[in-house]
Image: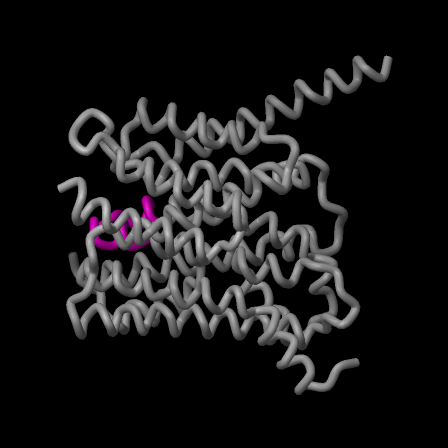
Amino acid sequence: MTDSHSALLIAVCAVITAALRFIPFLIFGKKKTPPFISYLGKVLPFAIMGMLVVFCLKGTSVTSFPYGIPELIGVLTVAVLHIWKRKTLLSIIAGTVIYILLVNFVFI
Amino acid sequence: MNSLKQDIRRALKATFPVFSGYIVLGFGFGIVLHSKGFGVLWALCMSLFIYAGSMQYVAIDLLSGGASVITMAITTVLVNARHLFYGISMIDKYKGAGKMKPYLIFALTDETYSLVCTEDEDNSHRYHLLVSLFNHIYWVSGSVIGAAVGSAFNFAPKGIDFALTALFVTVFVEQWLSSKDHTAAITGVLSSVICLIIFGADSFLIPAMLVITLSLTVLRFIRQRKGDKNDD
């Protein structure tokens, strides 16, 4: 992998990210937002977040050791702690520490 | 109208939760990035110019795997498509921001959006600018420190990248608790799992996004028809 290809990938990512943030202001800056776009704007964030959770766990194998048990415990820790305390940072740190302990010391 | 000093104080206070989150997540990003062979300068450039937390984590995989430009472009569109909708809801608010406007739009991350979208008469464009700028500084600092610590101690415990999974789970739970209608959340998870099984880990993201958009469109159509019938 060359540095110039990596730099190109970062530039592409930066330009497209910025474009996505600017496009609504350029298109709908003056007009009223169409109802279908407003609808997608309302429901997509919920669906995308579910997709991103699955994306993060995509490499987990449930058919071979450790059968996704560390991931399951990690996700449950985060979810339960968050429902209980609703403190984002606490949920993230506790879940990550437990997961690190599990994959380094328990499921090895 | 608040003085500059008051605005700075209010912005620092409002951004404190983001400060802790960005320092930790940025740190994690820097460490993971370094563990894949990209040091401080890469972390600095990515956090400065891309400035999108979850996308940068996803980008680590693509960078270290030597992905094609097309894959990077499509993945960026899919992962960051939600920013389109933040923009839509900030159109009126950022009107008249003048010279600050391009930066305000560029810096509209999930966390910044959650702070600037709230209604408050005291929130001037200058206040929005300070909130955006402070968050940007936290994120860049966190990632550079992470990459530096990574190179100094070669420190990257196995499993540290679970921090990102944890972040998404908290946002998912937060959204779940804040809404009575879980159809979209369930659609997102189900479509993704089904596409993951069918297309495999390396290529399920694009089909999943298409299936999600299509399902939500069909769902709206069905609900509208039901609504029309109920009106009769």
Query: Could you say which quadrant of the image residue B45 lies in?
Result: bottom left
Which residue is painted at 31% across and 49% down in the image? B162
* Residue A85 sits above or below residue B208 on the image: below
Query: Could you say which quadrant of the image residue A7 lies in?
Result: bottom left
Is residue B78 in sight in this rendering? no
- Quarter in which the N terminus of chain B is drawn: bottom right
Q: Residue A72: within the magenta?
A: no
Which residue is painted at 49% across and 47% down in the image? A82
Residue extent of the magenta highlight: B59-72
Which residue is painted at 45% across and 72% down in the image? B138
Picture coordinates of residue A50, whole percent (x, y): 46, 37
Picture coordinates of residue A58, whole percent (x, y): 30, 36
Q: Nearer the viewer, residue A97 or B26?
A: A97
Is residue B30 in sight in this rendering? yes
Query: Could you say which quadrant of the image residue A38 lies in?
Result: top right
- Quarter in which the C terminus of chain B is drawn: top right
Picture coordinates of residue A8, whole percent (x, y): 30, 60
* Residue B16 sits above or below residue B119 on the image: below
Q: Residue B70: within the magenta?
A: yes
